[in-house]
Image: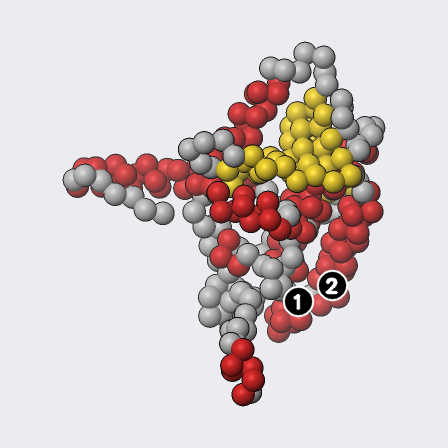
Amino acid sequence: MIATGSDDIGQALASRVADLIVDAANNAPRSQQKRIGPSEVGDPCERKLTYKMYDWPTVTDGGDPIASILGTGFHSWMEEAFTGRNTAGRYKIEERVTVREGATDDSTLAGSSDLYDRGTGTVFDWKLVGTSTLDNYRRKGPGDQYRKQAHLYGLGQENAGETPQRVAIVFVARYHELRVHVWTEPYDRQVALDALERLDRIRQQLIDLDPEAHPERWSQIPTSEEAKCRFCPWFKPGSTDLSVGCPGVQKQPTRSGFESLIA
């Protein structure tokens, strides 16, 4: 967070506004969510998911909230735009769907689906991203986490009595001109079921290891090279006690070709 002013009064006002924004973002309903949602199921880091399942005390508030705030505003704008074009009931807009009804609240998985188009049987999810991030998704695809999220919402729509045919992730760039990239593929229930099976395995691992009673066992819960550590509320650089915070992925430095030859 950066707050500056043209003079002392401006500086004080900037700090006050910035603090208000951070406080409001941290206390928004989405930020207060304790249960894992469809967008998190495919997170590559099992340790992060385990912390979330335990509702473990966080180290940080998750970082600068401005991207999340802009994303929430964009979702609201899209909701309003499609609502105004929904006279025939073609669209289901920001409706809550149940991906899986569990025996307990913890095992139930539900969330708000951005848009379902009954006309084409397409499940849409909106992502407001930076331009370089959009280009990366355009070149490499949406990544495993977003792909699983899309199919999980497809399963949620199927459970709601719909017949989804495709899933689509719509990337819109935060830029001075409109840039849109859409990744899409046919809906596959098995992708969602595999994601749920992985989540159940992680939950069972949590029960078996019981890291709350045996803090040393946190080290047995793996992280991932794909983990986005700097956005994780349990990220604590240099931590040697995983019950307090995670130091993040310890990536090995890349050796040059010459170093490989002489090693």
Which residue is disc 2 drawn over? Answer: 205
Above or below 54: residue 161? above
Q: How is the image coloured?
A: secondary structure
- Residue 10 in view: yes
Image coordinates of residue 240 in percent, x first then y, are: 51, 73
Residue 28 shown left or right of residue 107 in the figure: left
Q: How many marks?
A: 2
Q: Which mark is residue 221?
A: 1
Q: Is residue 170 above or below residue 80?
A: below
Q: Residue at x 76, y 22 (%)?
A: 119
Q: Position of residue 29 (x, y in %)?
A: 55, 36
* Quarter of the figure with residue 84: top right
Q: Indicate the amino acid at tag 2.
A: Gln
Out of 48 and 114, give the one closest to the viewer.
Answer: 114
Q: Residue at x 34, y 40 (%)?
A: 18
| Distance of label 1 from label 2 (alpha carbons) | 8 Å
Residue type of the residue flagged with mark 1 = Ile
- The front one of 59 and 6 is 6
Q: Give SS at disc 2.
A: helix
Horizontal and vertical percent for residue 28?
Answer: 51, 37
Query: Mark 1 near mark 2, Cβ–Cβ under 8 Å?
Result: yes
Asked whether residue 214 is in view, the answer is no
Relative placement, left or right, of 177 versus 210 is: left
